[in-house]
Image (cartoon, rainbow, N blue to C red):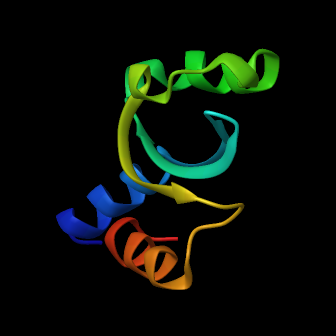
Amino acid sequence: MSFAEKLKTSQSELLYLVRGKDKGRVAWYYLLVDKMKQPIFTTTMKTKPSIMHLDEYGQIIDSGWGENPPADVVERITAQFGG
C-alpha cells in the first residue's frame, strides 16, 4: 500500500457524515474529526448530539441543507477520502 493510500485510509476512519438541524433546518455535514478528539466526539454523539458545535471537533469538509448530501458530493468525498 502506498503512502497516499495509507493516508486516505487513516483519514476515512476520521470522516463522519453528521445529520442534524441548524437554525431549525435539517442539514448534513461531512466532518473530518481531529484524531485526538475522536473519543470525545463519539461519546458526545451518543450522549448529547443535539448540542454539538462540530467545528470544535475537527474540520467541516462540506455541508448543506436537507437530509442527505447530493450524489456529486458523496462521489467527491468518497474519491478524496475513500469509502
Residue 15 location in percent, x, y? 48, 49
Considering depth in this image, is 79 or 56 the residue closer to the camera? 56
Query: Extreme left residue here?
Result: 3
Considering depth in this image, is 1 or 57 the residue closer to the camera? 57
Query: Extreme right residue here?
Result: 47
Q: Is residue 21 above or below residue 2?
A: above
Residue 4 location in percent, x, y? 21, 66
Q: Residue at x 73, y 24 (%)?
A: 49
Residue 16 location in percent, x, y? 56, 48
Drawn side of residue 80 relative to residue 40, left or right: left
Q: Residue at x 28, y 56 (%)?
A: 7
Query: Extreme front residue here?
Result: 24
Tell me where residue 66 sits by quadrant. bottom right
Split into 4 quadrants, where in the image is the N terminus? bottom left
Q: Residue at x 51, y 26 (%)?
A: 38
Residue 17 location in percent, x, y? 59, 52
Drawn side of residue 40 relative to residue 67, left or right: left
Q: Residue at x 50, y 58 (%)?
A: 64
Q: Is residue 78 above or below residue 29?
A: below
Q: Is residue 50 above or below residue 3?
A: above
Marker count (numbered): 0
Tell me where residue 42 sits by quadrant. top right
Considering depth in this image, is 48 or 11 the residue closer to the camera? 48
Q: Is residue 49 above or below residue 68?
A: above
